[in-house]
Amino acid sequence: MSGEATANAVLDIDLGALVGNWRRLRDRLRPGAICAGVVKADAYGLGADRVAPALAAAGCKLFFVAQIEEGVVLRRLLPEAEIAVLNGLLPGSAGEFVARRLIPVLNSLGEIAEWRHSGSGLPAIIHVDTGMARLGLPPGELARLAADPSLLAGTDLRALMSHLACAEEAGNPLNAAQLAAFAAARAALPPAPASLANSSGIFLGPSYHFDIARPGAALYGVNPLPGKANPMAQVIRLKGRILQTRDVDTGDTVGYGSTHRRGGPGRIATVAVGYADGWMRSLSNRGSVAIAGQRVPVVGRISMDLMTIDVTALDPQAVRPGCLAELIGPGNDVDAVAAAAGTIGYEILTSLGRRYHRVYSGGVA
Ligand SMILES: *Cc1c(COP(=O)(O)O)cnc(C)c1O
């Protein structure tokens, strides 16, 4: 393994900032509500093995993952935590849920029945669909459950949850419609703690907070309020190593497909990050990086392991093999990179390369 000094790219992950974000979200919640931590997809690409213990040390007691395999890994790290699995109970998986003390998020009457027959007093969260048409009991199944509470007999109902489709658009009428549908579902089912808000949902106000909030993206620095100032602290910084520089002149082309053609003399630097590292090919000829605090444009196609930048404007002494270019950082945060790539911060984070040399700092001692 290469060390930081020779790594092709270095990903700094600030667990102190992450924990600060969790506290900031928790402090926004209505009194009495608890703040869970969503750590699915390896904590949005940042490393669940480091992120989840840092959140637990800060007081987070309930974690959500997507897949049972993620829950199994998390259970080894956090023997005491409550761990809920959003993708629910696949046929035949109940034994593993019980053995690992994982809480399934039950998404259908079929899952509810399978869990009930797997043992008595087993904990579960029930997910009702209020407008996503993705996971959760559809309205017809909710009505059947409401009409026959014996379907839940013996199940330890830990929470009733639903998920917002448009929480990052405060003015979207679907938010209020989902809130009303969720209130109706609560009224129809046995009493249980309620959970509706993801990161952006927390910012829709206290009527969306209920008893448990489920933020993910905002913990990791993604702006829960697109188009407005980001209330969250940035958590990651990504730096790529400059491998080589060269002079180019009028008519020279740069990279695959010769998509960038020089209109005059200049200088190109090659950085050791490419689409195999999650620096998406859609960032070809898009966006910029910073060298010694100065922004320079990406030119040419992103290739698998490399990208090229136009450093004509910089002092050649500042751009030498071994120097670092900042790809994600204060002047170019996750959301800015996502905008340039035509995607959302979530996808930038969950695409972060496995080849990056990761350096964790901060956290809770
Ligand atoms: C991923 C997910 C969350 C977290 O959403 P963010 O927008 O990342 O805060 C919450 N609830 C459910 C059901 C999810 O799938």
Image (cartoon, rainbow, N blue to C red):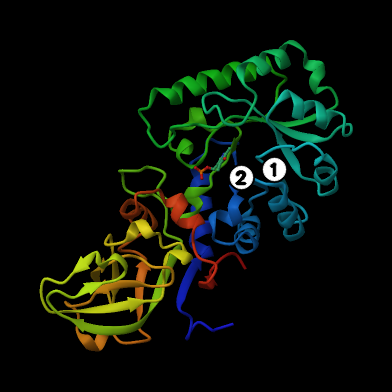
Q: Quadrant of the C terminus?
A: bottom right
State the residue position of label 2.
36
Q: Residue at x 64, y 53 (%)?
A: 59
Name, please, the residue furthest toward the bottom: 317
Tell me if residue 39 can be seen: no
How many marks are shown on the rendered structure? 2
Q: Which mark is residue 84?
A: 1
Whether residue 190 is situated above or below residue 3 in the rendered picture: above
Left of 84 or right of it: where is 7? Answer: left
Secondary structure state at the residue bearing disc 2: loop
Judged by depth in the image, the label closer to the viewer, 2 or 1, is: 1
- In front here: 88 or 84? 88
Question: Residue 185: which quarter of the image?
Answer: top right
Instruction: Name which residue type carries label 2.
Output: Ala
Residue 335 position in % (x across, y down):
37, 53
Q: Quadrant of the N terminus?
A: bottom right
Secondary structure state at the residue bearing disc 1: strand
Name, please, the residue furthest toward the top: 147
Whether residue 104 is situated above or below residue 298 in the rendered picture: above
Residue 17 position in % (x across, y down):
48, 61
Q: Residue at x 82, y 39 (%)?
A: 92
